[in-house]
Amino acid sequence: MKVIVLGAGIIGISTAWYLLDEGHEVTVVDRQDDAALETSFANGAQISVSFCEPWASADAPLKVAKWLLRDDSPLLFRPRLDPHQWRWGLSFLTQCHDAAFERNVAQLVALGRYSHESLKALVAATGIAYQRLERGILHFFSSQADFDAGAAGAEIMRRHGVDRRVLSRDDVLRVEPALAAFAPHIFGGTYTPSDESGDAKVFTQQLARLCAARGATFLYGHDVLGLERAGAAVSGVRVRERATQAVRTLAADHYVAAMGAFTAPLLRPLGLYLNIYPAKGYSATLRLKHPERASTVSLLDDGRKIAISRLGDQVRIAGTAEMAGYDTSLDGPTAQVRCRALVQRYEQLFPGVADTREPNFWAGLRPSTPTNIPYIGRSRIANLWLNAGHGTLGWTHGAGSGRALALLMSGKRPDLAFGFSGAVPVRPGGRLAPAAA
């Protein structure tokens, strides 16, 4: 079959790779000049299967309320006259109880484990290098109350088969000695040795090159203007080449919507209302002045809800989420506060280790759902497929999401317990049954 994948981030490129594995003809369309130049560009670099907890929990509403007036808060909700934002927020509140948390964790962990296995097999087969560090992820706590809550969270994850270990302060320092300067402020931590880190942009761009070498067509520099529908199916996608402003319609047998936070507005004209809203995340990438004193284990700082990952002779500090629409600018007062907070926190943790004069700030839109569970599967339109809504876990869930969607499109069942979109029916013999329009 001929398939058009809309979006060249980690999700879209992973989907393209596995569609090629299934023998399909693939075209990838993206408005940027290369793969991974938007949400996948400078994320937190963590592949965090064991820390893929949903944002919605029993104590989340109180935390968000306390953070409303703080420009540097971990989660900042800026109310707007936007019905999609309010729909998202109200749906989020319905997930803030223990039963929903457990249900959502089960799906996120299942997808994470499947994705990590897929990624490891893919890397072994291709030899892609992307500053990979298989040293686990260490979550440390700066108060006794937070540590107690973290230990309780670790117990929940262990019930789902996750090896998240509870550590004392001394144990934390044995795992990551570089935290010694901050030791008086550490009350304990949790650690998952099976997790890892690496540069998602480098990985995605290399995988895109391999897709092209296998015959995939890439239309970079093309804006996706909209999908055209004929009866029960999509008949084409209108695109505009940025260099010439020429508009044309591309046709295929099937279409995959993998445009991150922009997937939801793309599909609304078709009557499909995905509950995806952008969460603006920030990162700073610093050159290390003293690499020998920098951390090598990927870190989660619970006090500031930020991730810290080593990328060769650089360090990536990423975090915070701002629910304030589709703005990715860095020049506003709130953005400047949030960017500075990342660098200041790193300096508190590792004084003098990094060069803070050129922080290389970045902001991207995480495509978030109220449950943190992405849409993966077929839509109500027969030949339109969804792979979007991965929030902060696009890197963690990318390989598995692409593999699962390619299998579903090929009439096969992915081997994981996950609520795929569209309740995709498969006929005996592996042929895909028609979907309802």
Image (cartoon, rainbow, N blue to C red):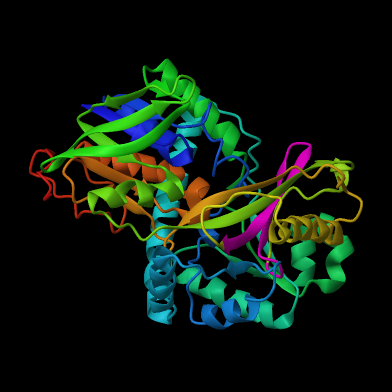
In-front residue for pair 268/413: 268
Residue drawn 50% across the image and 31% down it: 124
> Which quarter of the rendered picture does the N terminus lie within?
top left
Please name whichever residue, 304 or 382, is drawn nearer the observer in this view of the structure: 382
Residue placed most toward the observer, 12 or 276: 276
Residue 120 relative to residue 320: left or right: left
Q: Is residue 315 left or right of residue 109?
A: right
Does the magenta-highlighted stretch encompass residue 316?
Answer: yes
Number of marks:
0
- Which quadrant of the structure image shows residue 106? bottom left
Residue 41: quadrant of the picture: top right
Rendered residue at 83%/42% (across/down): 358
Considering the whole magenta stretch, tell me its main secondary structure.
Answer: strand
Left or right of 436 on screen, residue 121: right
Task: Please provide the residue range marked out in magenta.
Answer: 302-322
Is residue 227 left or right of 291 when viewed as pictured?
A: left
